Image (cartoon, rainbow, N blue to C red):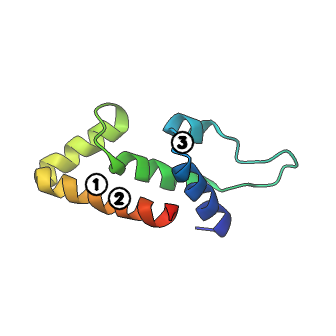
Amino acid sequence: MLMKDTIALGNWLRSKATLAEVESVSQYGLLDNERFTEQARRAYRLLWTWSAPRFGGIAGLKQERAYARLGADGLRRRFERCNRIIARLTS
């Protein structure tokens, strides 16, 4: 990930932005400068999906498959690992 992506991702996480807010924000600024790449948005989606239990949508389906494959302990470990990454990005 580029530095601008890491900065954008950290800002979204620190401000507790919703998935809808991140997906709706423009990638380009007023002067057509690229503020972040799609890689930052994909990283946020990944962290959002695995940071807490999700009961609907694609995230819910992914978590159900992970639960079936890994069990409750495996899913909990995945949540914990994701939250450690978030803590590192927001510190």
Q: What residue sits 46% from the left and 48% below the top?
A: 45
Q: CA distance from mark 1 to mark 2?
A: 5 Å
Q: Amino acid at mark 2?
A: Cys
Q: Position of residue 6 (x, y in %)?
A: 59, 63
Q: Residues within 10 Å of mark 3 (few under 14, many from 20)?
A: some
Q: Position of residue 55 (x, y in %)?
A: 28, 33
Q: Which residue is mark 1?
A: 79
Q: Which residue is at the far top?
A: 56
Query: How many marks on residues?
Result: 3
Q: Which residue is mark 3?
A: 17
* Residue 6 seen by the camera: yes
Q: Amino acid at mark 1?
A: Phe
Q: Of the residues under marks 2 and 3, which one precedes in the sequence?
A: 3
Q: What residue sits 20% from the left and 53% below the top?
A: 75
Mark 1–mark 2 CB contact (< 8 Å): yes
Q: Residue 88, relative to residue 49: is it above or below?
A: below
Q: Secondary structure at mark 3?
A: loop
Q: Amino acid at mark 3?
A: Ala
Left or right of 84? Residue 35 is right
Q: On residue 82, which mark appears?
A: 2
Q: Quadrant of residue 61?
A: top left
Q: CA distance from mark 1 to mark 3?
A: 18 Å
Which residue is at the front of the view, 72 or 15?
15
Q: Of the residues under marks 1 and 3, which one precedes in the sequence?
A: 3
Q: Secondary structure at mark 2?
A: helix
Mark 1–mark 3 CB contact (< 8 Å): no
Q: Position of residue 47 (x, y in %)?
A: 42, 53
Q: What residue sits 73% from the left and 54% below the top?
A: 35
Left or right of 71? Residue 75 is right
